[in-house]
Amino acid sequence: MTKHAAGWPAALSGSQKTGLAAWAALLAIQVLWYTLYPPVSIPTWVAFALTMPPLLLPLLSLPRVTRALLWVGILALFYFCHGVAEAWSSTGDRWLAALEIVVTLLLIGTLGVGVRRRG
């Protein structure tokens, strides 16, 4: 794979593009969630401080897209659990919980598709 001057791969695979889109969607879901449905028990800024930094940490792995997606995929497991818990316990924001579940499964699924078989 050839690289551009900045170290980015010349072309991303379809699974990498899908993974990056799912990562961005997961970030957007957090912003949307805590903007539309502010938490009752804690200040909104605390909710953002707890949910956003873990999703931003894999940016440190860029331009190695595969490594960044691996890290965000591991972190997505926690967001999957959050989505399941919210879908089970909340009513008003259940649609966001379902969206979070779908996006995390998509993200984790792209990691499986992107794995090369060694034989």
Image: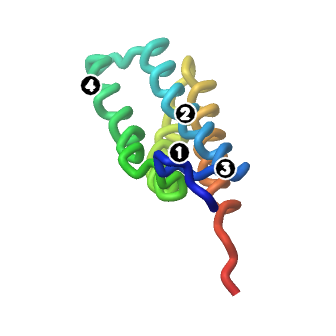
Residue at position x 54%, y 33% in the image: 24
The amino acid type found where label 3 is placed reads Ala
3D distance between C-alphas at marks 2 and 3:
19 Å
Dot 4 crowding, Cα within 10 Å, few <14, some 14–19, many 20+: few
Q: Which residue is mark 1?
A: 80
Q: Earlier in the sequence, mark 2 or mark 1?
A: 2
First in sequence, mark 2 or 4: give its number: 2
Q: Which mark is residue 24?
A: 2
Residue at the top extreme? 36
3D distance between C-alphas at marks 4 and 1: 20 Å
* x and y, in percent, of residue 76 in the image: 50, 47
**What label does residue 11 carry, if any?**
3
* Visual colour scheme: rainbow
Residue at the limit of the structure toward the right, as seen here:
14
- On the image, the x and y values in percent for residue 17 come to 66, 44
Label 1: how many Cα within 10 Å (few below 14, some 14–19, many 20+): many
Q: Position of residue 94 (x, y in %)?
A: 59, 26
Q: Closer to the camera: disc 2 or disc 3?
A: 3
Residue at 28% in and 20% down: 45
Q: Quadrant of the N terminus?
A: bottom right
The residues bearing labels 4 and 3 have C-alpha atoms spaced at a distance of 38 Å
Q: Position of residue 49 (x, y in %)?
A: 29, 29
Tell me the number on the disc at residue 17.
none
Above/below status of 61 relative to 83: below
Question: Tag 4: residue type?
Answer: Val
**Badge 3 element:** loop
Q: Which residue is disc 4 drawn over?
A: 46
The kind of secondary structure element at disc 2 is helix
Q: Nearer the viewer, mark 4 or mark 3?
A: 3
Q: Residue at x 54, y 39 (%)?
A: 23
Q: Secondary structure beneath disc 1? A: helix
